[in-house]
Amino acid sequence: MTELDDELLPDVATIVTDLGRSATLTEARVPGDYNPLTGAVSGTPDSHTVLITPPAPYESRFVGGDLVQAGDSVVLLSARLLANTVPAVPDPDVGWTVLIDTKTWRVVASNPIWSGAQICAFELQLRGT
């Protein structure tokens, strides 16, 4: 752990705790049994209740290409808060869904933000479903 990790990890966790809101992250994969005859997987995806920053729209200068579309938003998750959740939440990934209030978003990009030797936060690009 670096000196920057020592400072940023708790700071990011505090900011997300103070300003964040509750959300439900649902993994894209479905754990369970696979039936090779039908191709079906039994089970339900794992869901995790987490704190995230409120969704913020992208600045117009980023919208219009293939990566960021009109209506996309960005949120931050504290890596420390994810790790301290019981059970620990895996690193968020593309294809997961995020339920914030009554709106469901799909994760189209998950970018770790490094504070040195460790990830201090994840920046998620969200697209409405």
Image: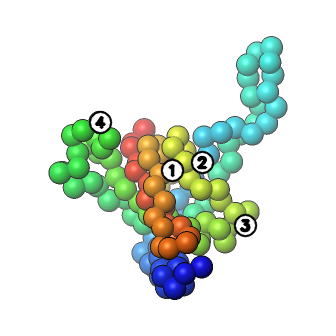
Q: Residue at x 37, y 56 (%)?
A: 74
Q: CA distance from mark 4 to mark 3?
A: 37 Å
**Where does label 3 land, which residue?**
86
Q: Is residue 100 above or below residue 11?
A: above
What is the distance, in whole Å, between disc 1 and disc 2 at their CAs?
6 Å
First in sequence: mark 4 or mark 3? 4
Viewer-closest of 4 and 57: 4
Q: Mark 3: which secondary structure?
A: loop
Image quarter for residue 83?
bottom right
Q: Name the residue that disc number 1 marks.
A: 98
Quadrant where the C terminus lies? top left
> What is the distance, in whole Å, between disc 3 and disc 2 at their CAs?
15 Å
Q: Amino acid at mark 3?
A: Val
In the rendered structure, are the residues bearing label 1 and label 2 in contact, judged by CB atoms less than 8 Å apart? yes
Disc 4 crowd rating (10 Å Cα; few below 14, some 14-19, many 20+) is few
Q: Amino acid at mark 2?
A: Thr
Q: Position of residue 69 (x, y in %)?
A: 28, 41
Q: Nearer the viewer, residue 119 or 68?
A: 119
| Marks 4 and 1, the one that precedes in the sequence | 4
| Neighbourhood count class around disc 3 (C-alpha, 10 Å): few under 14, some 14–19, many 20 upward | few
